[in-house]
Amino acid sequence: MSKILGLSAVLPGLLTAMLALPVNVTAGENELPYPMKVPLELSERLYQELTAQERALNQERNHLSPQYKKHNAECTVVEQGTPQAQQCLKTKEQLTPKISKYLERIAAHTKAVDMANRRNCQETQVLYELHQLEKILVSSKDQQARRLLKNKIVLNEKLLDKIRSDERIKDTAIQQLLPANVDCSKIGTDWYQHSPQAVMGSLSERLPGEAFIKYRDRWFRIGADTPIGIGDEIRTGPKDPIRVDLRDGSAVELGPNTTIVMQEEGLLAKLKSHFGKLHAIVKKRLNRRFVVRFSDCSYSVKGTEFTIEADREGSTIIMVFEGAVEFSGHDSSTSPVTIVAGQRAVVLPQGVIQSLDKVDLNQFVRWWETGMEESHSP
């Protein structure tokens, strides 16, 4: 009898090894690993490529993880020869190759992100050098010095292309520019500056979100008081809003995962946003218009407080708190629609207003004040 008890004591362990799905993970017991997060400070092409991988892997994990947990919960200890044991073996045979492929893709993604991080430091150094050369070129009056500077810029641009494409560098002149043993932390985040006449505003310290600026197709983190100029593309991080104080006294708050382009044409100030959410308080100025473009639709304002939220599919919601906003859709032949204080408009991806209603503004969560997220998707 004692021998039987002894065998039964070790049997669950034997069955665990046979029927459970062991996975070498660091995320925790009975968990599938998550894909490595992609750093925001990458070139646009590489960032889009790696984040697409990350999204696909997260979707795959969301699909596999419940099956994996369910199987291990039900099949870690089962009695041999029972229908449950047979079902567990069948499930294991189905899940094992799927999980193996998922882990292979996780490993490949991790390797790609690691390589991107290593390459990132060299790229940062080259971009820093390019920016310094461009600043010197702008202020230099000596023609010979300008020619030398332009030649250096061209060589550094070629080096940047080689680093980004991961090509072998054969040109000796370019090879000599390749930075070695660079400590990118010493470069900092405040080196990207504008000439005074190009500045539209600066990043405020009033809101806690992360902000990134694009320079030569690469995102760089920026801090409070960083000047933001005409043509700059700004992106926020995934968690908190940011605020940009414009030089005319207006203010623009951007929600998480929002991208805008700063533009100015004569007396026309523009903010072009691809998607995300925006709150603006626009100072009234004579002979000056402020235009926001979201999803190829135009919102013209003058002394107004309003919010706009657009999703990646092109649907947009605008709410006006003070003043009025003039909406123009894709069809230039149609008359603009005026949205006044206390109204909310829902705009379809086709660039036409689906609905225009009165709303109680007191019920609206002001995310730029509280940092709270609220969705108003149509």
Image: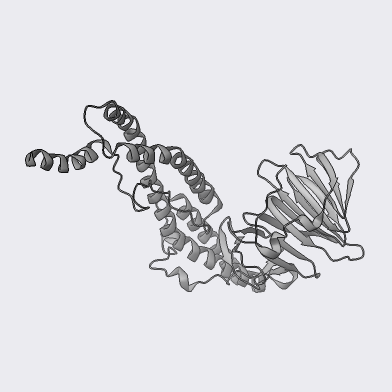
- Horizontally, residue 337 falls left or right of residue 233, namely right
Q: Residue at x 37, y 39 (%)?
A: 68
Q: Nearer the viewer, residue 223 or 243?
A: 243
| Quadrant in which the C terminus appears | top right
Whole-percent x, y for residue 229 in the image: 70, 65
Q: Please, is residue 117 above or below residue 246 in the view? A: above
Asked if residue 170 can be seen in this view, the reply is no
Q: Residue furthest front?
A: 1
Q: Quadrant of residue 132?
A: bottom right
Q: Residue at x 21, y 41 (%)?
A: 12
- Horizontally, residue 184 falls left or right of residue 200, namely left
Asked if residue 286 can be seen in this view, the reply is yes
Q: Quadrant of residue 291?
A: bottom right
Q: Nearer the viewer, residue 229 or 70?
A: 70
- Horizontally, residue 254 falls left or right of residue 166, namely right
Q: Nearer the viewer, residue 171 or 17?
A: 17
| Quadrant in which the N terminus appears | top left
Whole-percent x, y for residue 330 in the image: 80, 40
